[in-house]
Image (cartoon, rainbow, N blue to C red):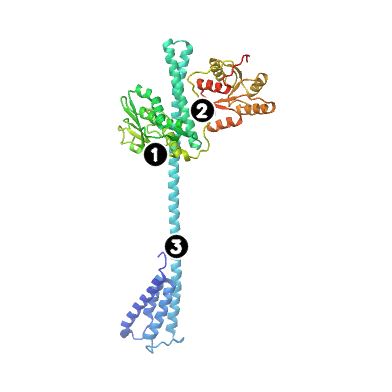
Amino acid sequence: MSELPSKPMRYFIAIAATAVAFTTRFLLKTVLGDVAPLLMFTLSVVVSAWYGGLDSGLLATALGALLGDYFFIQPFYSLRFYAERTEEVLFLGIGISISILSQARLSLLAKRQQLLDSERDARRAAEDARKAAEDARKAAEDANRLKDEFLCAVSHELRTPLTAINGWALMLRAGRLDAAQSARALENIVRNAKSQNQLINDLLDASRIIASKMRLDVAPLKLGSVIEAAVETVRPVAEAKGIRLSAMLDPAVDTMYGDAERLQQVVWNLLSNAVKFSPTGGRVEVRLERADSHVEIVVTDNGRGIKPGFLPYVFEHFRQEDSGTNRRHGGLGLGLAIVRHIVELHGGTVSVASEGLGKGATFTVALPIAWGRAVWLDESRDKAAGGRLAPENQPSLVGVRALVVDDDADARELIVMILAKGGAGARTAVSAAEALAACEECRPDVLIADIGMPGEDGYLLMEKLRAREKARGGHIPAIALTAYARQEDRLRALSVGYEYYVPKPVDPAELLAVVASMTNRIGKDEEF
């Protein structure tokens, strides 16, 4: 018995047991006479106290004493209790003792039950903890496996274009290629360099997402134009595979707010995946549709499709349905995770549907039209500081004097050659101290400095240069040209005094445009 009955139930037990005892003794009155008048009531006390505890036992004792004295002890039918009546005194003593002992028994049973419950709860908690630890161990093993697979994929994906770049470059240096082969070699080097740059950008985007530091540059945009730009970027690859790429854009979609570059990245990722997983001669379609208060971008293909069991993991980081060494398609498993994060930053959602392997897939991006007006932005990219400038006509930098600061000889040589092609003269420095001395010796029109240098880095160089200018007057426009391409690196570079921030690998046309913009295409007659 784990707990006592309720008080009414305990009283009911006492009354019922006493009634049964009274009835039995009354029926046996002709047989027993006045012998053992309280014996049956003693049994009722035992039953009441056993099930009801102290209260029930004492009530049965009192009722038994009254009924026994009135009906079965002479003189009959009168209540006259005398201390000399030994049988009544013994009955009361026995009844009280039985009640107290039964109450103690029930209390011990209750404590025992509590201990058993505590032990059961402890066992259950231990089992839950064991299961949680097992789940955590499995999760850690899965995470470790995913990490190993991802690192293998990174190594493979980075080495693949690097192998092509290195191989073609060695053959060009050896002079073993004719003109046509040399052109093909250069084309392969450029294509693989772009591929490697895209991989690095995906890794940086994934890092920004994990650190919650990806930001948007929100402005009015025509979503149809954004989609058309992404389609034209992917079209050459689709045509090479014989895939029919079509776009159906609803002209009724109004101007909306968003980051055009990031949204183009979303569409490009979805189209690239569709083309990559579609068979030769397949079909890929992108549609732009208006749906109430939002617009939908729908990308559909008739490719290999997605297993139902993998659909919940499609947009997770580092997840790939085909992740073995014998996989048919490359990639790091980051593109769709980046897509989801960019879409969510725009206040939208992205979903995927597939009927299974061999039945294609459909990705749907839903974007609210009025989102951009109320969006909260921690920071927007400064187009003048970090935007891509790609003029159609290369600017003339004849007479412009530049100081190039970089501890890497190959990087210095490349920048000097790019500037020379634009008509600018360049002087080089390999350290911050040498750069400051060069600025003292002959003031350049523009300073192009790397950030990561031994000893004093590019940040310290700019801090010293700006402090010197503050004391002496004058100002040298400065460009940070660096492989540190995180958002916080750009902000720090701008905060210490750089006017422009250009991440490596540098686009020659962009660098020439930035230099031209900063120098206002000023020509200088004297040599530098």
Q: Can residue 102 be seen in this view?
A: yes
Q: Which of marks 1 and 2 is nearer the N terminus?
A: 1
Q: Is residue 268 visible?
A: no
Q: Where is residue 248 in the image (x, y as percent from the top left)?
A: 34, 30
Estimate how packed mark 2 is, as few (under 14), some (14 to 19) or many (20 or more) residues with alpha carbons within 10 Å: some
Kindly give the residue lying farthest to the bottom in the view shown.
75
Q: Which of marks 3 and 1 is nearer the N terminus?
A: 3
Of the numbered discs in the image, which one, if any, rests on residue 294?
1
Estimate how packed mark 1 is, as few (under 14), some (14 to 19) or many (20 or more) residues with alpha carbons within 10 Å: some
Q: Quadrant of residue 349?
A: top left
SS for dot 3: helix
Callout in the foreground (2, 3): 2
x 47%, y 18%: residue? 166
Kindly give the residue lying farthest to the right in the view shown.
471
x 44%, y 46%: residue? 132
Q: Nearer the viewer, residue 528 or 239?
A: 528
Q: What residue type is labelled 1?
A: His
Distance CA(mark 2)–CA(mark 3): 75 Å
Viewed as shown, does residue 95 lie left or right of 486?
left
x 43%, y 14%: residue? 183
Total numbered labels? 3
Pointer 2 with pointer 3, Cβ within 8 A: no
Q: Position of residue 102 (x, y in %)?
A: 43, 71
Q: Mark 2 points at which residue?
A: 387
Viewed as shown, does residue 477 lie left or right of 333?
right
Q: What residue type is labelled 2?
A: Gly
Q: Name the residue under label 3.
A: 112
Viewed as shown, does residue 409 lie left or right of 27?
right
Q: Which amino acid does label 3 sit on?
A: Arg
